[in-house]
Amino acid sequence: MTNKELISAYYQMWNEKDFEKANSICDEDIRFRGSLDITANGIEGFKEYAHMLANAFPNLYHAVEMSVYENNTVATYVTYTGTHEGQLFDYAPTGKRICYSGASFFQIKNGKIASINILGDLNSLHKQLSE
């Protein structure tokens, strides 16, 4: 799988909420920092984070706006949209539609995603959830 195919499979996994795909596209010791500034290590930690986010936003969609591929590093700019239907931080479900952005930085090793560092626009997300 090329790096481009690997990153495409990653976002497809998120959009389909099929987090078992992480077993085939992520290194078992993946280091992950998500858009909510929560870190997780290993595939199981990553999947726990993914399920937590999917519970808060069951229709969460990752729209990749831009990608840059350089050797074994990939950077993407993503817009996240969804409806707040589950507990997140101190926010009870609001039913509000949210939209915020993030920049993701991937390191690929031996054909799998070894680390992901995502800088999410948390100020925008908090503002939308508290209004």
Image (cartoon, grey):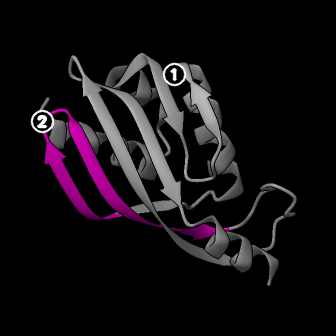
Q: Is residue 116 above or below residue 67?
A: above
Q: Is residue 29 above or below residue 6?
A: above
Magenta part, dominant SS? strand
Q: Is residue 112 left or right of residue 47?
A: left
* Badge 2: residue crowd in 10 Å (few <14, some 14–19, many ≥20): few
Q: Position of residue 51 (x, y in %)?
A: 63, 40
**Which residue sits at x=47%, y=38%?**
18
Quadrant of the rendering where the N terminus is positioned: top left
Magenta-colored span: 64-83
Q: Position of residue 124 (x, y in %)?
A: 62, 75
Task: Report, in whole angstroms, how far the alpha carbon at label 1 lies from the one at label 2.
Answer: 23 Å
Quadrant of the rendering where the C terminus is positioned: bottom right
Q: Which of the two residues, 48 or 101, is positioned nearer the viewer here?
A: 101
**Which residue sits at x=30%, y=32%?**
107
Residue at image mark 1: 43
Q: Is residue 91 left or right of residue 10?
A: right
Q: Which of the two residues, 18 or 80, is positioned nearer the viewer here?
A: 80
**Which residue sits at x=81%, y=77%?**
130
